Image (cartoon, rainbow, N blue to C red):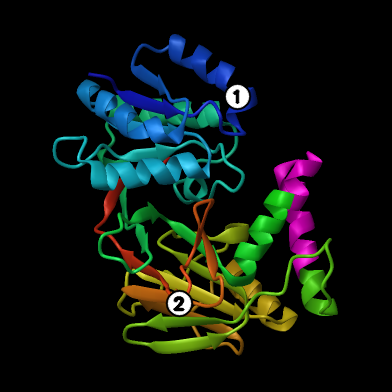
């Protein structure tokens, strides 16, 4: 039996420089069972092997796509007897939203040391439950993809702009994200189309079972089960309305965007109605539009022609929170 099972994807961007340190750390700590995959398609087999050592904690060391595939396999695969061990995520992706939500920030090795410390002393008081977003195209025969943070509309366009236009410049992540944010604000204020700016978001129709339909063009569309969102803003945790999925949409205008960011940073998002900012909770969300694309934990999904992207929430899964 291992205290920790560490699942690493050497091909993730962060691991290109960090993996030698991870390997060295694991070699010095026999309580860690380290499994490396060459491709995310091998994660299912990796989890079947990891289940045999019965770890107290499962740690994912990879980018957003690695985390998403691991979540999907854990939920659907049945690799562990009963519930899987609590999941921890090292801060090793471009955005690290799941790691941030679980209190894993800064140096990944320091986070791994913290996980080992918790595993040695008992994990129970550090375990938190999180629901997952289940994404399908509405076809009952399609295997859902699982994640925790989804961006659509202008946000999806901005993420793709950052990935395709800004990241190739080789700048630090923080500076890349700042430049992308400035480009988004500039495109909102100027209202022009240019190759050096993100495209104007296409009109969308977003439907919730109980709350009705919202239509328009949106600078931001976020669906999440996390407690924190972009720019370290808080989700509307004080909202007691029913529904496992938290939805925020911001109209395509600079005033609405600034208003939403200010409310999120101050912890007031969702506490009162704001013009141009739509905050809802729901059990099922349908997103429809011409070539409507969303990004779930770093992976891009697009609705079929005339179809919809359908989001529901799962039963809770255990995660390990590193912060005190």
Q: Nearer the viewer, residue 182 or 204?
A: 204
Q: Indicate whether residue 258 is drawn in magenta.
A: no
Q: Earlier in the sequence, mark 2 or mark 1?
A: 1
Q: Position of residue 170 (x, y in %)?
A: 78, 39
Q: Is residue 264 left or right of residue 76?
A: right
Q: Residue at x 54, y 51 (%)?
A: 298
Q: Residue at x 75, y 67 (%)?
A: 184
Q: On the rendered structure, is 283 left or right of 106?
A: left
x and y, in percent, of residue 278 in the image: 52, 83
Left or right position of 101 against 231: left
What is the C-alpha distance between the residues marked 2 and 1? 44 Å
Q: Which mark is residue 306?
A: 2
Point out the image quarter for the C terminus: top left
Question: What secondary structure is the magenta-colored segment mainly?
Answer: helix
Along the viewing direction, whichever of 146 and 139 lies nearer the viewer: 139
Would you place residue 149 above or below residue 188 in this image?
above
Residue 36: x %, y % from top left: 43, 22
Residue identifier under label 1:
18
Nearest to the observer: residue 100 or residue 157: 157
- Image coordinates of residue 154 in percent, x first then y, are 64, 70
**Which quadrant of the figure has residue 145?**
bottom left
Left or right: 270 in relation to 53: right
Q: Is residue 199 visible?
A: yes
Residues rendered magenta in the picture: 165-184
Furthest residue toward left: 82
Above or below, 95 against 20 in this view is below
Pointer 2 and pointer 1: residues touching (CB < 8 Å)? no
Residue 323 visible: no
Q: Residues within 10 Å of mark 1 (few under 14, many from 20)?
A: some
Q: Residue at x 30, y 54 (%)?
A: 143
* Residue at the front extreme of this rendering: 305
The quarter of the picture where the N terminus appears is top left
């Amino acid at each position: 039996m291992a205290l920790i099972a560490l699942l690493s994807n050497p091909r993730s961007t962060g691991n290109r420089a960090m993996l030698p340190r991870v390997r060295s750390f694991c070699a010095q700590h026999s309580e860690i069972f380290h499994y490396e995959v060459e491709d995310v398609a091998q994660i299912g087999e990796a989890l079947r092997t990891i289940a045999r050592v019965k770890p107290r904690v499962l740690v994912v060391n990879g980018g957003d796509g690695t985390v998403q595939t691991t979540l999907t396999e854990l939920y659907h695969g049945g690799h562990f007897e009963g519930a899987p061990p609590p999941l921890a995520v090292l801060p090793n992706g471009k955005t690290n939203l799941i790691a941030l939500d679980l209190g894993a920030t800064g140096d990944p090795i320091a986070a791994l040391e913290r996980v080992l410390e918790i595993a040695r002393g008992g994990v129970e008081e550090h375990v938190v439950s999180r629901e997952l977003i289940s994404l399908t195209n509405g076809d009952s025969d399609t295997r859902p993809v699982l994640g925790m943070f989804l961006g659509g509309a202008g946000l999806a366009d901005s993420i793709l702009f950052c990935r395709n236009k800004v990241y190739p410049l080789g700048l630090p992540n923080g500076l890349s994200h700042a430049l992308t944010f400035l480009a988004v604000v500039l495109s909102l204020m100027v209202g022009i189309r240019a190759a050096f700016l993100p495209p104007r978001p296409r009109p969308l129709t977003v439907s919730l079972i109980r709350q009705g339909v919202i239509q328009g063009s949106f600078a931001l569309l976020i669906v999440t089960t996390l407690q924190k969102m972009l720019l370290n803003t808080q989700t509307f945790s004080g909202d007691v309305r029913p529904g496992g999925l938290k939805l925020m949409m911001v109209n395509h205008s600079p005033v609405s965007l600034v208003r939403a960011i200010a409310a999120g940073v101050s912890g007031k998002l969702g506490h009162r109605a704001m013009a141009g900012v739509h905050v809802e909770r729901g059990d099922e969300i349908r997103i429809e539009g011409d070539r409507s694309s969303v990004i779930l934990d770093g992976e891009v999904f697009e609705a079929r022609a005339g179809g919809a992207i359908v989001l529901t929430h799962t039963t809770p899964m255990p995660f390990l929170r590193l912060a005190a």
